[in-house]
């Protein structure tokens, strides 16, 4: 289905907003009173989770598609701006060429998008599932990635030593180890979606690309030379060996 824009609403299922040509502005709920605006250029996408309010404004002569995804294909953080993905672009062009009119025709194309998006979002570094309520609360708090342990502990009415103890008991890894893996997973996901390395690094609490590359190198034992050409690709290859 080709859209030209729509007012604020939400869906009971995840979907992909892909811009075939022109440009599109998507407005999402922000952390404050003003909405978050994301401008999508041609061949870029927004992976949108179910239940997320949004509105869309298409520039003149723009064409976008909004294919529905399977219910389990939810973006990890509610939405993900995908600045470039050759695989997604090829699938979208195939959808345009086939113009599926029945569920039987749509199903294989939906599965292809599901697979591409789930691979894009997959974590490179495993993190155990939390059982302790306080650990889950800290893990769900995005500021835990950006401020010192002392500030995290104060924010959650605990001592730094207690935070370290419950993380070690519950996850088998320290708070710092959890934070490093989480930062790297989030940054690498953004990089695979087309974000510049420096921008992805700053979004998760590093000062810039150098800090991110060093952190990846310490965890993977890959050299700076191995990481410099394709950071996300080098990490993914090292994890698949």
Image (cartoon, rainbow, N blue to C red):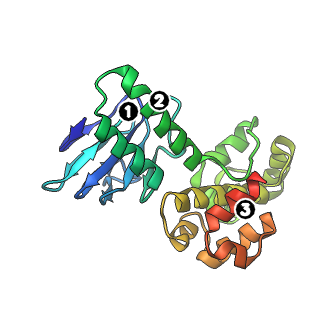
Q: Label 1 vs label 2: CA separation?
A: 7 Å
Position of 105 compared to 234: left or right? left
| Residue under pointer 3 | 149
Q: Which residue is mark 1?
A: 68
The residue sitting at 46% across, 39% down in the picture is: 113
Height in image: 2 above or below 149? above
Position above or below: 132 against 143: above
Q: Earlier in the sequence, mark 3 or mark 1?
A: 1
Which residue: 58% across, 76% down? 208
CA distance separating discs 2 and 3:
38 Å
Mark 3 Cα-neighbour bin, 10 Å: few <14, some 14–19, many ≥20? some
- Residue 186 seen by the camera: yes
Could you say which disc has been placed on residue 5 in the image?
none
Do labels 1 and 2 touch, CB within 8 Å?
Answer: no
- For the C terminus, the quadrant is bottom right
Query: Element under label 2?
Result: loop
Which percent across, then down, holds residue 54? 31, 43
> Callout 1: helix, strand or loop?
loop
Residue behind mark 2: 70
Q: Residue furthest front?
A: 97
Q: Position of residue 40 (x, y in %)?
A: 32, 57
């Amino acid at each position: 289905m080709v859209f030209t824009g729509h007012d604020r609403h939400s869906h009971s299922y995840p979907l992909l907003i892909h811009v075939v040509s022109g440009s599109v502005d998507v407005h999402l709920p922000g952390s404050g009173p003003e909405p978050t605006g994301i401008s999508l250029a041609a061949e870029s996408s927004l992976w949108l989770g179910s239940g997320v309010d949004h509105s869309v404004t298409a520039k003149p002569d723009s064409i976008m598609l909004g294919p529905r995804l399977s219910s389990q294909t939810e973006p990890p953080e509610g939405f993900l701006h995908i600045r470039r993905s050759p695989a997604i672009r090829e699938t979208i062009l195939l959808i345009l060429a086939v113009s599926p009119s029945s569920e039987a025709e749509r199903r294989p194309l939906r599965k292809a998008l599901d697979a591409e998006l789930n691979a894009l979002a997959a974590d490179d570094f495993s993190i155990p599932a939390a059982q302790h309520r306080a650990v889950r609360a800290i893990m769900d708090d995005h500021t835990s990635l950006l401020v010192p342990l002392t500030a995290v502990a104060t924010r959650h009415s605990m001592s730094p030593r207690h935070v370290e103890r419950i993380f070690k008991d519950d996850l088998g890894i320290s708070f710092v180890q959890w934070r490093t893996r989480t930062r790297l997973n989030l940054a690498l996901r953004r990089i695979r979606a087309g974000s510049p390395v420096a921008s992805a690094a700053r979004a998760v609490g590093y000062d810039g690309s150098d800090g991110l590359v060093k952190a990846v190198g310490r965890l993977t034992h890959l050299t700076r030379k191995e990481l410099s050409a394709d950071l996300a690709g080098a990490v993914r290859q090292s994890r698949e060996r």
